[in-house]
Amino acid sequence: MKITLTGSLGNITKPIAETLVAKGYEVKIISSNPDRAEAIKAMGAIPLIGSVADTAFLTAAFTGADAVYTMVPPDFSVPNFKAYISEIGKNYAVAIQQSGVKKVVNLSSVGADLPDGTGPIAGLHEVEKTFAQLDGVAVKHLRAGYFYINFLANVDMVKHANILGSNFGADAKLVLVHPGHIAKVAAEAFEDDFAGKSVQYVASDDESTPADVAKALGTAVSKPALPWIEFSDKDAFNGMTGAGLPEEIAKNYVEMGDAIRSNVLFVDYFKNKPVLGGATLQDFAAEFAVAYNG
């Protein structure tokens, strides 16, 4: 099987590629960074250097592939984050149709069933809608939970403010996932005989609350009493922009936090719960401690 992956050597694409190469598949990896080419070759994959904004490049990259993995790489420089995500999805759709690819595994998100009010996830809702129009193409959307590794951005907060928090409460529902588990599910999906358009939820933990996260991470860094603090939207926005995030990106993440706080983000997930897999919260706490102590 010939498979083209987007996502360069990211936390999900790299382990997908390693798994597929080990199984003997021909794997091509799209990256916008020419400096990644040698590392991609060292893995036994073929580098394709170009931009996901370039539909001609994408079409050439997808041509000849039996299947492709699509994900929208983050770009924090864009003026409209949701529109950017939607537009990259349209680029992928054009390239899929023009290249003749018949099988797609697409990275989406829990909450992508909702059309708005979810921050950047609303952009992934648009991607799913765009892919729904692909004639004769089997598409499996992997709706992944909230990445454990997002909490690594809070190392300084824990270290210097002795708190962990966001604009949702300590008892909010969470659906958490490790990127490694997403990679495992994605790699397996290429060998599935799926047809039409389908959704598969991917999660590692759907029982832990933000308070549980604070306790686990705090304990791992010798701060067992670490509290989870619910910020106001304004304070969350100011904290993110103060840490260097552009206002457009901070605005979107505040909106996503609102969707968690109001318990709307995970409603469809809990109606269609998957088999959990991958790292537990305790496993990730050990990763967090390494980053914290590093």
Image (spheres, rainbow, N blue to C red):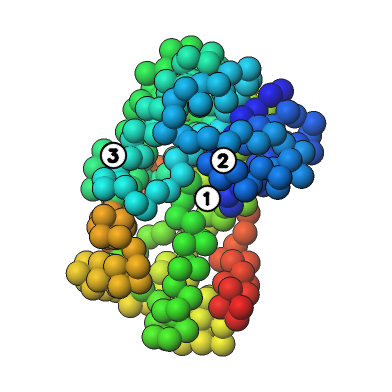
Whole-percent x, y for residue 197 in the image: 46, 23
Residue 84 appears in which quarter of the rendering?
top left
Tell me the CA gap for discs 3 and 2.
Answer: 21 Å
Residue on which the image places disc 2:
31
Disc 3 target residue:
83
Mark 1 or mark 2, which is nearer the start of the sequence? 2
Relative placement, left or right, of 179 versus 238 is: right
Whichever of labels 1 and 3 marks the residue nearer the N terminus, that label is 3
Closest to the camera, between mark 3 and mark 2, is 2
Q: Residue 184, can we see it?
A: no
Left or right: 272 as drawn, with respect to 32? left
As helix, strand or loop, the secondary structure at mark 1 comes to loop
User: Extreme front residue here?
Assistant: 34
Does residue 226 appear to the left or right of 26 in the view shown? left
Could you classify mark 3 by the number of other residues whose Cα lies within 10 Å: few (under 14), some (14-19), or many (20 or more)?
some
Q: Does residue 173 appear anywhere in the picture?
A: yes
The quadrant of the image that shows the N terminus is top right
Q: Nearer the viewer, residue 130 or 113?
A: 130
- Mark 3 or mark 2, earlier in chain: 2
Amino acid type, mark 3: Ala
* Tag 1 near tag 3, CB within 8 Å: no
Residue on which disc 1 sits = 203
Judged from the image, the secondary structure of the residue bearing numbered disc 2 is strand
Residue 99 appears at what percent x and percent y?
A: 53, 16
**Which amino acid, mark 2?**
Ser
- Which residue: 63% across, 75% down? 290
Q: Kindly identify the amino acid type of the residue bearing the numbered disc 1.
A: Ala
